[in-house]
Amino acid sequence: MLDKNGIAKRIAQELRDGYYVNLGIGIPTLVANFIPAGVNVMLQSENGMLGMGPFPFEGEEDPDLINAGKQTITEIPGTAYFDSALSFGMIRAGKVDLTILGAMEVSEDGDIANWKIPGKMVKGMGGAMDLVAAAKNIIVAMQHVNKAGESKLLPKCSLPLTGVRCVKKVVTELGMFDIVPGKGFVLLERAPGVSVEQIKNATAGKLVVEGDIPEMSI
Amino acid sequence: MLDKNGIAKRIAQELRDGYYVNLGIGIPTLVANFIPAGVNVMLQSENGMLGMGPFPFEGEEDPDLINAGKQTITEIPGTAYFDSALSFGMIRAGKVDLTILGAMEVSEDGDIANWKIPGKMVKGMGGAMDLVAAAKNIIVAMQHVNKAGESKLLPKCSLPLTGVRCVKKVVTELGMFDIVPGKGFVLLERAPGVSVEQIKNATAGKLVVEGDIPEMSI
Amino acid sequence: MNKVVADAAEAVKDINDGAVIMLGGFGLCGIPENSISALIKKGVKNLTCISNNAGVDDFGIGLMLQTRQVKKMISSYVGENAEFERQLLSGELEVDLIPQGTLATRCMAAKYGMPAVWVRAGFGTEIQNGKEAREFVFQGEKNNYLLEEAFSADYSIVKAWKGDKFGNLIFRKTARNFNDPMAGAAKITIAEVEELVEPGELDPNQIHIPGIFVQRIFQGKSYEKRIEQRTTRKRA
Amino acid sequence: MNKVVADAAEAVKDINDGAVIMLGGFGLCGIPENSISALIKKGVKNLTCISNNAGVDDFGIGLMLQTRQVKKMISSYVGENAEFERQLLSGELEVDLIPQGTLATRCMAAKYGMPAVWVRAGFGTEIQNGKEAREFVFQGEKNNYLLEEAFSADYSIVKAWKGDKFGNLIFRKTARNFNDPMAGAAKITIAEVEELVEPGELDPNQIHIPGIFVQRIFQGKSYEKRIEQRTTRKRA
């Protein structure tokens, strides 16, 4: 079973040298801590920055320099700033190679729900709808089941959608899955110590298990 | 009768302090030489500049600094450079207060033709179609009749149109006219030494002469 | 060409009840602090605010919510704001939540004189309700798009780092955000700047907003620039 | 992240016959001189060139017309070019003339991932033929707009003043023109720069094109920067 850092670590292995990457809030943010050696990626922050660096040293926070999670950050050599319209322009035009974000539910067709729970105060979708509508490659990082123990990998999402047929991959504490429209959640790797049986039991959507499923090495 | 400089001089009297102005090639360019004292205007050049200054001194030409007529120019204090898309964005959004351009024909409804003569090599419309489609206020500077002696102020344009119902005013060597759709060319002022009769004879479109028409003072 | 007004009070003096206002900033970063204070002092009511966020309880647009000056918020994310939540649940406040990129692009569309834009965000979601959808092939790929209208706002209020008297503006780092597409997107654009200089002092090659998009400019004062999430790392 | 290629020859080496290419510049100002020379040396044929102008007989795209490498020009103004005129009249060359703002905006649309844009230019003229027209009310004013498609180009070739190895670009004065909206508007963007520097040497606040829009960059050489209309005034 993976903890949050484990999920982030496994997703980090999907990064390729030269990728432009947008990281959502939560587990996705942790991915930045596990970028493999020799892999150079540029982090895009949709509020208007390419080349997001680490948090500043104490006392060096700049209120004019934050990320999309409103955290103080730093720039790196080669950073570029731009406005919100151009930022979503580059997202919409598919220039961002990989988007990693959290979700409440994902369907076997690649639909995603992560912004609204009916009856609860809705804070807004922020940039999530724009990102999922346009990113070429979307990996969802999330817990496999919700607090009530119900699967979040579903035949159909029950919550209001953020986007349709867009998620390509899901990594949970139990394993890593490709989403192949018309086929379902294709199990690629088991988390350390997790059996295929455990994954089957926790997955409400169509699970595809083809051949021997390797345990992931992280 | 006005010469080219006279037409430019009369149009220059229409400038108001604080105007952003786009000047077409030909007579319109001359308007810059006659801006009244105390009237500050900013010249927009659609290739990407606000605050166009005069031609450079000999030996100070900068190939990276040209106007839409591809002439070497200079900047002024307060100049801003920008790209072609933003340039036409500001034009399209009506931020340019006045556009002055030449024409081959103008109709009594305010249609304008100035880019194409069937059977002749067509060089292109450049930015003219964008300018006439969006400018709030368009003044045409042109000769009243063509080389064949035919009126260029027509009931309908015979040449392919550049824009429809857009010209607000025309200044020719014979006089100054408002174009009021549904009414026609409303004669505002006669050029020095020109009679209403002369203007009537040279105008094929509907000419409106209301009351005494003053002679212009330039 | 001189667009300078004395201060925020003069800049907002003709903003009346019921106005539709764009306000720049992302979170509390790059928000027009002086103008918000002036609007509160003026007490103008029933505002429709187009702003990516709604501030926090005691700063930014949150202050205008405390004084009940806002009728409607058009935002992508309204965050942690107790008074906002109370007014929303009680029906005192209308909220129109729209995707962040769509929000930015509807501002940009207005600035560029485009009446509407086609975007992919929201297709197949409840955001699509009542909107025209269409399939386009673009660079060999078929996708569905929604037609989203340009905003029609009365005022756009932005905050820049430097500006000159002609209204030319330069932003700093990520404080550029929505201030850039909003500058020029309303009938009247008001810019408050940290440093107001003479025309010619800004490098004309580095201007983010040409002055033609700005109708009023003033030198702001006492910027607090509050940080919403102060995240740091320890020195090694 | 390193986008650097050795020279123009390497930058254009995979541009094949029949490619659709955007070329930056306005007149002869800011044109990608090195890349044009490399395309001529390579001898690639049947190109469709999206460029505001077509150069002059002995410079710029005019040189590619001399070598008959261009099948079609998409431009707003083709100017004074005898060989161009000859090829056009003889039917060797296709020309699509479109309004300059529409040209710029169709580039920008591609760069911003918008499949089409609504513009007023050309409504009621022959430019409207075959295009969808629609009336929109925008900021209280009713007007007619035409739907214009984003360009789908294989390559965009731009010229910048300075650039870094990540592809970040800065233009100079009016040489920015179409280079800006074209950068990032095609599948592959090639940038040639007068000065190539290390990442971090350009002020991140002053970058016109973030590197994400650029796939290849190289240090150009021997720029001629020819002036088309040398206009001057006498010293007093």
Image (cartoon, coloured by chain):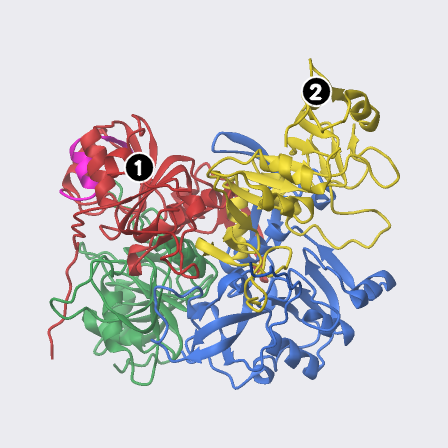
Chain colours: A green, B yellow, C red, D blue
Vertical comparison of A130 with D71: above or below: above
Q: Chain of mark 1?
A: C
Task: Pinpoint residue A87: horizontal percent, then vertical percent.
Answer: 39, 58
The residue carrying mark 2 is B183
Examine the image and state in which quarter residue D206 appears.
bottom left
Task: Pinpoint residue D56: horizontal percent, then vertical percent.
Answer: 72, 67
Vertical comparison of C108 with A131: above or below: above
Seen in the image, is A119 located left or right of residue A48?
A: left
Q: Residues within 10 Å of mark 1 (few under 14, many from 20)?
A: many
- Magenta span: C58-73
Query: Residue lying furthest top in this view?
Result: B211
Q: Chain of mark 2?
A: B
Query: Residue lying furthest front in this view?
Result: D236
The residue carrying mark 1 is C49
Task: Pinpoint residue A155: horizontal percent, then vertical percent.
Answer: 37, 56
- Disc 1 marks a residue whose amino acid type is Cys
Examine the image and state in which quarter residue D128 appears.
top right
Seen in the image, is C106 located left or right of residue A62?
A: right
Seen in the image, is A98 located left or right of residue C236?
A: right
Task: Pinpoint residue D88: horizontal percent, then vertical percent.
Answer: 82, 62
The residue lying at 61 percent from left, 76 percent from top is D224
Instruction: Single out the mark in the foreground, 2 or 1.
Output: 2
As for residue D204 lying within the magenta part, the answer is no
- Give me the disc on residue D178: none
Alpha carbon separation for disc pair 2 and 1: 43 Å
Give the SS element for disc 1.
strand
